[in-house]
Image (tube, helix red, strand yellow):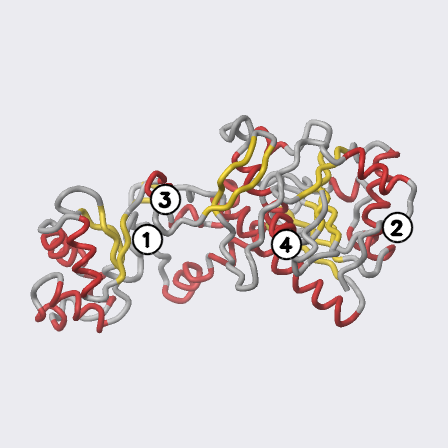
Amino acid sequence: MSANADGPLAGLLVVSVEQAVAAPFATSRLADAGARVIKIERPEGDFARAYDHVVGGECAWFVWLNRGKESVVLDIKDAGDNALLQRMIAHADVFVQNLAPGAAGRAGLDSAELRRRNPRLVTCDISGYGESGPYAAMKAYDFLIQCESGIASVTGTPESASRVGVSVCDIGAGLNAYGAILEAVLARHRTGRGGGIALSLFDGMADWMTVPLLHLEHGGKAPARTGLRHAMIAPYGAYPVGCGGQMVIAIQNEREWARFCEAILGDASLATDARFAGHPARLANRPEMDALIAAAFARHDMDSLAAALGEAQIAFGRLNEVSGLSAHPQLRRAAVATSAGTVEIVAPPARHDDADRPLRPVPALGEHSAAIRAEFGSGEVSSDESAD
């Protein structure tokens, strides 16, 4: 599989000993931008290949996160395979790994040593809790980090905490890795030297939890779980509509609240009512406010309410199921080839004004093993040149 020669990262060679979600997310974005990404898989494959089999026998997670890569099967505990991997890294621009704690070092993949041998190398080590501290040796997965970081405590209903329905810790770590790798590549262009990046799922989610933490430590109280209501802004949440379904509205300032009172609640005087003047007052009197909103929404169906809210310039959204996303008029899709055939997935979020970037295929397990072993087996330099 040749890399996208027209992409902004064309010529960049990325070697990734990766599994699951966080590292594959980061490297999939590098591949989308034109980098050549060689994915190292154990003989049984990345275990994410077996999470499910819903896409014609392929895993939904794997299809999403491994497009545009080359798959080579290596047993990094085998001396010959490890030597081959070392030769690949010697020619690489970026090395990424998210193995279990301590596994990379035991396999001779210590990032500082790799950079000593190849000073232009950018290394990215992704872990659950970081390289040091009392939790450093603990295995970690997304749901565990959601609980440890406290995000589950601010998610759900007043009666019950809840897991966020997608793997936000993994995905957040992948985004952090992608951004940090790009920064390091830019720095190398200026200095001629690579750099080491270490990041963790826990640190990434702790960063996202800054506002609840500040509320606790400076305000004396963490935000409460409020289900489909914002914990600190009101009205900002879902309300039932007369003919079924729920509409979510968001009032961000007093100008919007005044328009909402006049146009939707039908009582302009509510805008200056002491019970509802400002977010703190509305939060304190939320039951009365919610009753007024529910009564007003009960007079509408979804379409008439959407029209009224739009006319009043009030931000709103329908509470959709996944089926609603599937049929959403704003949803953009892109085709990607897999072993099971071409699949339509959600298009990458960034839109580029120069040209569309077609997604390259999702590799079968070991699809490129023979070619990569031949390319790097002799120890000769790869024909792919460095990006800078």
Circle 4/circle 1 CB separation < 8 Å? no
Residue 260 is situated, as x and y percent measured from the top left of the image, at 17, 65
Name the residue tied to disc 1.
Answer: 224
Circle 3/circle 4 CB separation < 8 Å? no
Name the residue tied to disc 2.
Answer: 381
Rounded to the nearest angstrom, the CA distance separating label 3 from label 4 is 32 Å
Name the residue tied to disc 4.
Answer: 199
| Residue 329 shows in this picture | yes
Residue 250 is situated, as x and y percent measured from the top left of the image, at 27, 60
Numbered disc in front, either 3 or 4: 3
Left or right of residue 386: residue 124: left
Name the residue tied to disc 3.
Answer: 325
Name the residue at 13% across, 52% down: 297
In the depicted view, which residue is nearer to us: 258 or 39?
39
Q: Residues within 10 Å of mark 1 (few under 14, many from 20)?
A: some
Q: Which quarter of the rendering shows the N terminus?
A: top right
In the structure shown, which secondary structural element does the residue marked by tag 4 occupy? strand
Of labels 2 and 4, earlier in sequence is: 4
Rounded to the nearest angstrom, the CA distance separating label 4 from label 1 is 29 Å
In the structure shown, which secondary structural element does the residue marked by tag 3 occupy? helix
Q: Residues within 10 Å of mark 4 (few under 14, many from 20)?
A: many
